[in-house]
Image: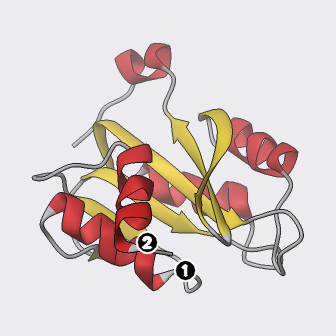
């Protein structure tokens, strides 16, 4: 993948300079990480860093910990308008996760999901958000 194609991944995730982005998960794609860091002009922060994020990149593969529980934890990392990007292997790749499983876990965690978008040769990103009605009823840091 060329650098310009990878930058498109960051653009597709709507990440831009000045945003604070946390990363959760052991898997991943270094080219996507580099593109995100280039786009936000900062390094990705680990989940244990004490600050709320504009976005969380959650690398998840079949067989990882319970996705719903992980999403609940990731939600606590977000600021009021933050989003979670669940990054999973594409169809046919080892560790592939069905969109229906992501959608179900998102629902359990109180999140709304959109369709998956390919962001790299081996990875798909699914955008999850706290529904607007829940944002009005929640307290964010």
Image-based side of 83 in relation to 42, left or right:
right
Q: Position of residue 88 (x, y in %)?
A: 68, 65
- In this figure, which residue is indicated by the disc labeled 2? 32
- Identify which residue is drawn at 55% across, 40% down: 128
Residue 73 visible somewhere in the drawing: yes
- In this figure, which residue is indicated by the disc labeled 1? 28
Image-based side of 56 in relation to 36, left or right:
right
Check disc 1: other Cα within 10 Å, few if <14, some if 14-19, many if 20+: many
Image-based side of 139 in relation to 141, left or right:
right
Q: Position of residue 125 (x, y in %)?
A: 59, 53
Q: Is residue 17 above or below residue 34?
A: above
Q: Are marks 2 and 1 in contact (CB under 8 Å)?
A: yes
> How is the model colour-coded?
secondary structure
Give the foreground label among 2 and 1. Answer: 2
* Nearer-the-camera pick, 60 or 36: 36
- Identify which residue is drawn at 74% across, 78% down: 64
């Amino acid at each position: 993948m060329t650098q310009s194609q990878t930058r498109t991944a960051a653009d597709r995730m709507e990440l831009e300079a000045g945003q604070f982005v946390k990363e959760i998960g052991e898997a991943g794609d270094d080219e996507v990480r580099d593109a995100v860091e280039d786009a936000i002009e900062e390094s990705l922060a680990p989940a244990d860093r004490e600050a709320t994020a504009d976005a969380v990149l959650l690398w998840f593969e079949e067989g990882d910990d319970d996705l719903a529980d992980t999403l609940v934890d990731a939600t606590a990392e977000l600021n009021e308008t933050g989003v979670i990007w669940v990054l999973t292997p594409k169809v046919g790749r080892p560790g592939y996760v069905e969109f229906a499983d992501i959608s179900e876990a998102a629902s359990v965690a109180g999140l709304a999901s959109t369709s998956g978008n390919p962001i790299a040769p081996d990875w798909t990103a699914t955008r999850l958000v706290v529904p607007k009605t829940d944002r009005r009823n929640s307290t964010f840091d």
